């Protein structure tokens, strides 16, 4: 039976990285982004290109865990590993210049949305045509959010004396919102289903709210940097004016997401709830469902049944050989008891041998990745567990030891090695109408370190030391931190890829920082 992947608990990370610009083709040294999600969670994202032909990508990582964490095969089994390390997969938003989203040229996002809405004319709720129209509208909202955020960040990183980029951003926002509303007015008289009409209204509300947020945030940032410069003050005013215009548009449309200076806590709570609903509705076009299965379940049951059969055959043979014909109970009871005990241990031994065989030759879990329409877009095989130092590849050991000063360090700072491997087979995409929608799958991993840190020491310790210069003794508070080194790589197909290393610095209080070693 399939087990459902964990629900995404914090959608802020999903929307925060929509503006990432992944590479447009597979790379031998594909980048992996590592970040601190919160005090106890490390997060990293991997991109898998969608190509015309099917492709395979293998992720492999070795976590060098200090022995003081007390994590080993006896205390940290596979279930615990997969409970703490999970991932979700979505489509990556295509990289489109922000100003191009206002275009109605053939093949543009708005032109395709218009064609889908026209095709939905006269169709009832639940129709394929209606679903296609809603899909196009939601995708357009995701494009606005991602491309607009990227454009806003470009302006923020620009020169404080250059108003041209900020003014162009305001113009692009106005053009995008104007083009979308013109489309909705043009199609307003069509015989659209209630679902499509509601989706169009929500798309307008979401785009308006997003653009207001971008312009208001950018206006505040530029206003704070103006230092009396008239040009920047002027453009900050233009940004604020656009944000106000968007708020008035939603008010005039009778929509809920309108702020107020004297709003009550309950009103602000409702505002945030509504914004969250719009985010989830529009971003759902990117979501992919994961069907996770135990990969070798049938093999396990077959081999364990074989172990039981072999053990029972031995017990039966021993019992038949100890016939009660002599009439003395002990003469046949003792062999039977011994046979039963040997049978029990034989069964356990064979199960252990078979379990080791399965672990070496079969993945722990298999995944199916499907989009919202049920189309399969990928298959995954996953394995994890502790490995011995002597079995580590030479390149992994060299990468781990690149900062080592002496061989004795491995004895002074002993570590257990936790291995994780995931092979993702991405289905090829057709070159038809849907081909240009998405160019990437993005998998976001999240590692929960709560269990890892439960046996760490107090982060603050008092130490005493003597200063040889002034011949006095001092005391100080010393911070106790631990290093979790991760050696990893992502390789497409059978190609080789270099190994990389990062260091996660943690304390009893949680994650302190992530250092990139190479």
Image: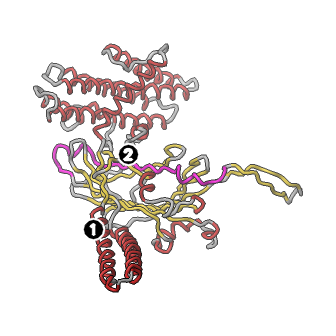
Q: Is residue 190 left or right of residue 75?
A: left
- Residue 480 visible, this angle: yes
Q: How many marks?
A: 2
Q: Out of 267 and 92, give the one closest to the viewer.
A: 267
Q: Residue furthest bottom?
A: 326
x 28%, y 58%: residue: 425
Residue beneath disc 1: 302
448 inside magenta stretch: yes
Looking at marks 2 and 1 on the same chain, the residue that comes earlier in the sequence is marked by 2
SS type, badge 1: helix
x 61%, y 56%: residue: 482
Residue 506, percent across and down?
58, 52
Give the magenta part as a residue range: 429-458
Q: Out of 78 and 233, give the one closest to the viewer.
A: 78
Q: Nearer the viewer, mark 2 or mark 1?
A: 1
Q: Is residue 227 left or right of residue 175?
A: right
Q: Out of 56 and 268, give the one closest to the viewer.
A: 268
Label drawn at residue 401? none
Up the image or down, 289 lies above or below 210; here it is below
- Residue 28 visible, this angle: no
Q: Residues within 10 Å of mark 2 (few under 14, many from 20)?
A: few
Residue beneath disc 2: 6
Q: Place residue 268 in its image quadrant.
A: top left
């Amino acid at each position: 039976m399939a087990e459902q992947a964990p629900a995404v608990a914090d959608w802020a990370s999903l929307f925060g990285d929509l503006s990432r610009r992944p590479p447009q083709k597979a790379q031998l040294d594909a980048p992996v982004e590592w970040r601190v999600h919160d005090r106890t969670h490390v997060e990293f994202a991997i991109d898998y290109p969608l190509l015309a032909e099917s492709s395979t990508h293998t992720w492999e990582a070795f976590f060098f865990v200090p022995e003081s964490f007390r994590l080993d095969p006896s205390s940290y089994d596979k279930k615990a590993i997969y409970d703490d390390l999970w991932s979700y997969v979505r489509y990556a938003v295509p990289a489109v210049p922000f100003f191009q989203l206002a275009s109605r040229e053939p093949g543009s996002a708005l032109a395709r949305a218009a064609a889908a809405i026209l095709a939905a004319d006269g169709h009832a709720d639940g129709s394929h045509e209606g679903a296609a129209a809603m899909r196009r509208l939601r995708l357009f909202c995701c494009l606005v959010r991602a491309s607009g955020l990227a454009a806003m960040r470009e302006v923020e990183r620009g020169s404080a004396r250059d108003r041209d980029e900020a003014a162009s951003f305001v113009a692009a926002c106005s053009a995008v919102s104007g083009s979308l509303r013109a489309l909705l007015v043009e199609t307003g008289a069509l015989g659209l289903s209630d679902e499509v009409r509601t989706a169009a209204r929500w798309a307008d509300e979401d785009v308006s709210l997003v653009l207001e947020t971008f312009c208001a945030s950018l206006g505040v940032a530029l206003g704070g940097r103006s230092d009396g410069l008239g040009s920047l003050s002027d453009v900050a005013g233009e940004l604020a004016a656009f944000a106000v215009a968007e708020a008035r548009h939603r008010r005039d449309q009778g929509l809920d997401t309108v702020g107020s200076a004297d709003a009550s806590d309950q009103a602000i709570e409702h505002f945030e709830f509504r914004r969250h609903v719009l985010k989830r509705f529009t971003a759902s076009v990117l979501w992919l469902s994961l069907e996770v299965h135990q990969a070798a379940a049938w093999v396990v049951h077959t081999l364990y049944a074989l172990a039981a059969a072999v053990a029972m055959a031995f017990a039966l043979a021993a019992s038949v050989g100890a016939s009660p014909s002599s009439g003395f109970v002990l003469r046949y009871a003792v062999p039977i008891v011994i046979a039963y005990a040997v049978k029990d241990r034989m069964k356990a031994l064979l199960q252990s041998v078979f379990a080791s065989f399965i672990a070496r030759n079969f993945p722990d879990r298999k995944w199916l990745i499907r989009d919202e329409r049920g189309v399969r877009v990928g298959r995954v095989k996953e394995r994890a567990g502790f490995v011995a130092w002597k079995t580590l590849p030479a390149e992994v050991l060299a990468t781990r030891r690149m900062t080592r000063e002496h061989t004795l360090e491995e004895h002074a700072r002993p570590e257990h090695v936790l291995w994780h491997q995931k092979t993702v087979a991405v289905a090829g995409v057709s070159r038809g109408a849907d081909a240009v929608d998405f160019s990437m799958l993005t998998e976001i991993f999240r590692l929960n370190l709560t269990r890892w840190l439960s046996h760490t020491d107090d982060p603050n310790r008092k130490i005493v030391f003597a200063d040889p210069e002034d011949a006095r003794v001092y005391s100080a508070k010393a911070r106790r931190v631990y290093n979790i080194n991760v050696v990893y790589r992502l390789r497409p197909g059978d190609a080789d890829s270099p190994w990389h290393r990062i260091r996660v610095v943690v304390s009893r209080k949680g994650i302190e920082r992530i250092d990139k070693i190479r």
